[in-house]
Image (spheres, grey):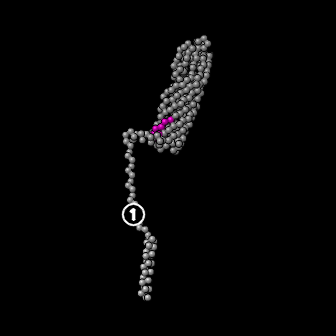
Amino acid sequence: MKMSNWVLAAASAALAACFAAPAVAQTAAPPPAPAATPAPDAEPPPEPTGVRAGLSSAWTALTSGRAYAGIGAGEADTSGFNGAIQDVNISGDAYKVSGKGLLGYQFSRIIGLEIQYADLGSRTVTGSFGNLQSSSSTSESQLSVAFTGAIPISDNFSLFGKAGDSRNHMNASNFCVGGAGNGSGFCSQYGGSKNDIMWGVGVSYSFNTHVSLRLEYEDFGKFSATAGASGGNILNGVTHQGDIRGSNIALDLIFTF
């Protein structure tokens, strides 16, 4: 009887150990995961060369520039009115107040491109022959496209220059002095449009990266080829070539975006 109890106790202990082992195994911590191998560094793309390098540099210059706009006011001079043609004295106002607006793009601190419109004012032109006199008025304006260049001389100051093409316009202004009815008088014909080379020089001062002030002189070239002291039309058919030219001194306020 005692032997049976011992055998039964041993069997019970063995059976309990069989069920306890999986439970311990289930609660054991999992083994650590293997360390990840770092990925190799990617190779940098090759640098462009030749034509590709040139195109890349040009594109960078175009996209890294800054646009700007400006307004200006000054004094315009239209020369070539005063003088005499066949004893007819011609005179006209020279200096008038001018105003202008401009848009530009600065590719770098040195090189830019600029579009400008300027109103150079209205002038009275008079012709006299003895006691006979007649007059009319004419106004001038210009529209130009020009490349600009700057030479920095300090953080704020730069010397400034530009050159391009100007479309110069003079409104029609006609008058006759003397015996116009019988063909012996003098008729002056002012007006028309003309393209000519324009240029300008000046100095620029930057208050900050967005606002600057520019003082400049501009020469727009010829405004008419058949007018002025050495030009006009005589009623007998003789034509004298003229040389009316326009220039401007202005102070411009520039806003850079």
Q: Quadrant of residue 7?
A: bottom left
Up the image or down, 26 lies above or below 14; here it is: above
Q: What x and y, as percent, mark residue 101? A: 56, 35
Magenta residue check for 122: no
Residue at image coords 53%, 23% = 224
* Magenta span includes 108: yes
Residue type at tag 1: Pro
Name the residue rendered at 38%, 53% in the picture: 41
Q: Is 13 located above or below residue 145 in the figure?
A: below
Residue 117 or residue 206, whichever sits in front: 117
Judging by the rendered image, the residue that carries numbered circle 1 is 34
Tell whether 130 sits left or right of 106. right
Is residue 207 something that shows in the picture?
Answer: no
Identify which residue, 216 or 109, lies in the foreground.
109
**Residue 185 appearing in the image:** yes
Indicate the position of residue 28 as horizontal and vertical percent values: 44, 71
Disc 1 packing (10 Å; few <14; some 14–19; many ≥20):
few
